[in-house]
Image (cartoon, rainbow, N blue to C red):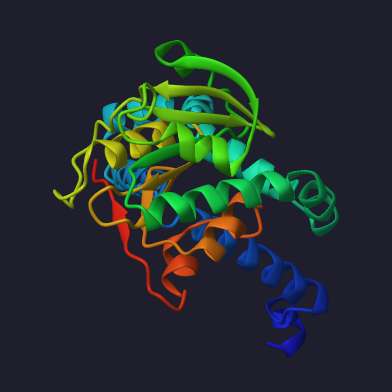
Amino acid sequence: MSLEQFRFLIPGFRDILEILIVAYVLYRVLLFLAGTRALQTLGGLVVLVLVYFVAVQLNFSMISSLLGVVFTYGAFAAIVVFQPELRHALSRLGRSRVMRFLASRETEGVIEEIVAAVERLSRRSTGAIIAVEGEVSLNDYLESGKEMHANVSADLLTTIFTPYSPLHDGAVMIRGDSIIAAGCVLPLTQYPVEDKSLGTRHRAALGLSEETDAVVVVVSEETSKVSIAIRGLLHRGVTPQQLQEVLAGQTWPSIDTMAAAPDQPDTTTVTS
C-alpha cells in the first residue's frame, strides 16, 4: 500500500477552513441556547436520536418506524417550538455594527430616559415593571391596563409608579419612543421558580419574557435591586450601564456575559 491511497485522509486548507467555520457556528448556536429551555428541548431531541439509532441496530421495527414519522414532521414542530428563539436569533443577525449605530441615534434618548427613571425608582425603593416591546407585539396585554400615547420620559415613568397612584401596580408597555399602556396585568410564569423570595412583579416579568421577546425591567420594592427578564431568564442586580447596553442591543443577558460583570449579578432560572 502506498501513501497515495490515504491522501484523502490528509485535510487541505479548504477542509480545515470549512471545519473551523462549522465548529464556530455550532459553538455560537450552543452559546445562544445556553441557559434556556430550548437547550433542554434540544437535549430531548438528542435522546430521541440515540433511541432511534439503538432501535435500528436491534431491529425494533415499530419503535424505529414511529420515530421515523416523528423525525419526518419534526422540522415543522421545531419551527413552532423554537419560534421565539428563532425570531430572536434572526433579529440578532440583523444587528450589525452599522445597523446598531443607526438605531442608536434614534433610540439613545429613549434608553436614557428609561435608565434615568429606573435609577430614580431604585433609589426610592419604588416597585416598578417596564416592558420594552421587541419583534413580538404586546397588543394582547394592552386591554388589561390603560392605553396611552405619550412620549417616553423619566418624569412620566416615575410619576406612573408613584405609590398609591391609579396605575402604579401594573406594568408599563413601551413601543419605540412611546408609552402605549400603563397598569397592565402580565401573565405569571407557569414554571416553578427556584428562588421563593421573588414576588409577583418578578414572576410576571418572567411570564411575559416566556411568551414574547420583550425586555422586561423590574425594580424590587423590597431590595431596590434592578432585574431584567428576557427569554425566560431573570438577571438580578443589573447596573445602569448594563441596562443601557441591553436596551441598546449591544449585549444580551446570558449566563456567561452577565456573570462576567464586575458586580456579579445573580441569575435566576425557572425549571420546567
What is the total number of numbered labels drawn onto the structure image? Answer: 0
The residue at the far top in this view is: 143
**Quarter containing the N terminus:** bottom right
Q: Is residue 126 above or below residue 75?
A: below
Residue 92: percent from left, percent from top: 67, 48
Q: Is residue 66 left or right of residue 136?
A: left
- Pick whichever, 260 or 20, lies toward us: 260
Judged left or right of residue 30, residue 1 is: right
**Percent x, y of residue 33:** 47, 52
| Image height of 266 relative to 150, above or below | below
Question: Which of the 4 image quadrants contains residue 101?
Answer: bottom right
Q: Residue at x 32, y 52 (%)?
A: 125
| Residue 199 against residue 167 in the figure, above or below | below
Side of 114 relative to 4 (left or right): left
Q: Is residue 214 visible?
A: no
- What residue is at 58 percent from the left and 27 percent from the top? 136
Camera-side residue of 226 and 121:
121
Query: Splitting the image into 4 quarters, where does residue 226 fall?
Result: bottom left
Q: Is residue 232 visible?
A: yes
